Amino acid sequence: MVMQNGKKTVVSNIPFTIEPLRVMREMKIPHLKSLEEIPEKPLADSIRKAIDTGYSLIHGKGVYATYSLSPEGDEPDLTGLFSGEKIVKLMTECDYVTLLVCTIGPDLETEVEKLQEKDGMSSAYSLEMVGGWMADYMADRLDERIERDIVKAGYGRTMRFSPGYGSWDLSSQPMLLNLAGAEKIGVALTDTNIMIPRKSVSAVIGWQRKS
Amino acid sequence: MTLLSDLQKRIHILDGSAGALLQDRGLPSGHAPDLWNLENPQAIESMHREYAEAGADIVITNTFGASRLRLAEYGAEGRLKDINRAAVRLARRGAPGRYVAGDVGPLGGIMAPSGEISFDEGVSIFREQISVLVSEGVDLIVIETMFDLMEMKAAVIAANDVRGSIPLMASMTFTADGLTDTGTDPVTAAITLEGLQVDIVAANCSIGPGPMVEVVERLATATHLPVAVQPNAGLPKNIAGKTVFEMGMGELASFGPSFVKAGANIVGGCCGSTPDYIRQIAGELKGLKPESRVVRTSSMAFTSATMVVYAGEGESFVKVGEKINPTGRKKFAESIKEGRLDMVLAEARKQMEHGATALDVNVGVPMTDEAMNMGRAITSLQNVVPLPLVIDSSYVSALEAGLQVYPGKALVNSINAEQERLDEITPIIKRYGASVIALLAGDFIPEKAIDRVKVAEKILRHLEDNGVPKERVIFDCLALVVSAMQEGARQTLDTIRMVKQEFDAPTIAGISNVSFGLPERKLINNSFLGIAIGAGLDAGIVNPYDPDMTHAVAAASLFSGRDPSCRSFIDMMETKEEDSQEKKTGPVTTREKVNHCILEGDKESIVALTQQALDEGIDAMELFVDVMTPAIRHLGELFAQRKKFIPHLVSAADTMKRGVAVLDPILKAGRGGKEDKGTIIFATVKGDIHDIGKNVCVIMLENFGFNVIDLGRSVPMEDILESAKENNASIIALSALMTTTMMQMKKVVDEVKAENLPCKVMVGGAVVTRGFAAEIGADVYVKDVGGVVPATEDLMKLCRV
């Protein structure tokens, strides 16, 4: 065994940077390379303010756990977790799988709601866009940490794969979140298997045998 | 003979991996190697013997995972003492005459603020193991394979609590990019570890030997301490469930001389290396002596987890941002009192953007828990700024709370000559390896420079006598208010010169207060700053937002040996923003201004401008139809041409909404209001909680005069249909962001058809496509916000037909 099966590791206070250029691209503003190049000053100011606000509302957290795909004894059987041709095929090449969930927390979403009420849609929209890619950003940071564990154990890694990609159904979300330990970082599911806070990511990374 | 003095004379050889070797001897996969100290002592003893015979000067005990949490994974935490004791004895027996190093690995969990293990808990766990190793008489403690500087700090502090004079080696693990997993570079690690008073800094594991040469080189240029290195035998590969390192012993050993040349005093092996590898390394390095090193000399350095700031002669002037401070700032103080950190974080980022090289952090607000606030602030600040922090408080508890969550070598603000303050603060400076600002005052501020120097002597003597070396001290020479005491300024400048002369130590001063009570304060501050830099001032607590301050520092640095070849000054002036653009011709009439305001998305000005237009007698309907609507329609055209984008539409729509709110009461009162353009029921479908796109569409449609009834998100089909019937709606507009919820759209379409309702159905949202819309029988598909108004207008025409 190369790691503790099912041990849930929580990572809090994930450092982050909100890149204005990335926010602009998220808002589908192409070509321009900085906020200073946006000719409409109020719009640039609104994005700038949203970035400032984002820094105090984003609280990156993640949790992950690794499981053997050939469980022994009372180790959980992950057979029911994967559905859809691509993910099932990918997992046949792996000995282990790391399940991960991360979030930027609920504060940004709450503020977006408030802004829609009191300050108008443009402020809310800018803040929503600032938060738009930050859950993925946090997932990338977690991903780096997991990848190092994988490499250290002499394995290759698969791509990060989430329920909802391809034909992997969202109905696997409850099992994934439970096994990853999502409750430790305050991520839950609606009855339609959407994560709350909305700015959250759930995914798996396989520990792939090297050819 | 002691190990540390020996290290200066010849290269020492450390042993190699235990795991691979023990697995070859039957250690089952998944079984803790540490347990074999009790279960199979012969194997452990013979391993040490083989390493000693191979040429290892230092053997490391088999205790990498013999700490509480790690052993608990195997239910063996109750045998911690026995396992560690046995390990030391076996190493002694197996390798007589060699140095025995007590090995300490990571905790087996993540430390706060990133993880769940508190600093105190971490220290306690490490101390429990290290005290056993110490009591068994190890010659050296090795803390190794640490990728988190915070965890290393806890381990070192634990070791310092119990090790007495036993040397301590602290070894971080760097990845291929030359940084630890948490982003610490070798220089920052070396400076922080030196501050924590370790005896040897080191790198081990993770990468093969090639990239580690540069890591060693960087460690060696940052500290005079001995450097050790233990590379893996290349990169691992998992073959048939077993981790294999494929680099041969000859190849690994061939890097030995490069390590020595880079500055290593100790060379060994990590994962994948065996006694045969160590034999080759020992052979390769036989007779070699440590190279002399060129270490960056500087009076003082402090760090974050990822950055170093040097203060001293010839270094860049250190600009410590002063803005995280509630003194005299009501809103800022209020935010801290409410437990909010938004203003703290905003000031931090803003100061960094304005060129601050470090940030002073003071969160002292009366009637608040300053220690808790300091801990929270220091934790959060590290998430958003990489700059080193200056932890500033009158309370020792607040200083300690900040230091406990700060992985780097902090600068503490401040200590002074009051005996009580000296006695309280010195131990925590020492314990957490911090640097400190020494305020040249005691119970009072001495008037004369000569007396301030005496105060400096007293503070320095106390610090040095209690284990804080001079290299961790920067003296605040006290810049006083010039309007109250003009002679005081001269004494400050004399103090700067004398402190540098007497102690060869760096100096700092708070600048902004010198001008208190006078006009043109910035001019006075910056003039004083220039003169003080000329006198030798190395750092200032300054207002980074003042561009004249930046220029004053840059210019004064030219005359004080801080800007070789004037390069920084020239670069700064070359990149200085030149606002040479001609002022654009703006809108002239109020109508033009309202139109322009919407195009620009200037929601702050629209209300006043709309009111101004009404006051000038412009008809409300004319404003709506001929001024505002054309503006947003024009923007829509520009959007279609990909000259403007969604944020422009949102911003303009939001602005227009505010303008229309001014017009609405007038429009409703006269001539029956706006034209009835039809009713739209808008909803995000059941199960879907994403609604911002829908909300933007609603505003766009309202601005164009449509009557929009927004039912919100996750709306059941029944509610949508009921509302459509009740309001005689022409269009049902549905939004969905998830593939799993978009099928709800089909249900609505089917039911509209089944009931033969006189409604058209419009669908859109991130996952919805034109093909899907056609497949489910929707009347129209809207790709994005830009398309919603034209699509609605077209659909309304059909409704009327």
Image (tube, coloured by chain):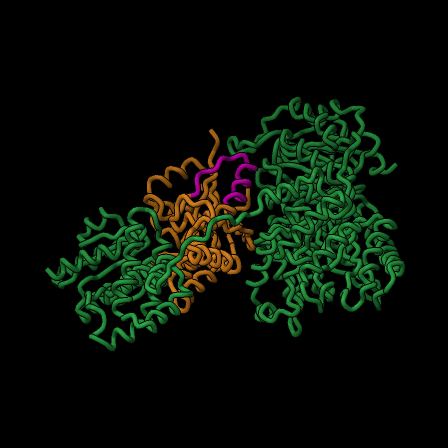
Residue B508 figure quarter: bottom right
For chain A, the rendered hue is orange
Q: At which x and y percent is residue B386? A: 61, 50
Q: Residue at x 41, y 65 (%)?
A: B605
Q: Which residues are magenta?
A: A142-160
- In terms of depth relative to the viewer, which is nearer, B437 or B502? B502
From the viewer's perspective, tell me whether residue B598 is left or right of residue A48: left
Quarter that holds the N terminus of chain B: top right
Residue B35 visible at all: no
Furthest toward the left, the residue is B801
Chain identifier for the green-coloured part of the image: B
Q: Is residue B278 left or right of residue A114?
A: right
Q: Nearer the viewer, residue B358 or A135?
A: B358
- Towards the viewer: A144 or B126: A144
Q: Is residue B544 above or below residue B255?
A: below
Left or right position of B289 against A26: right
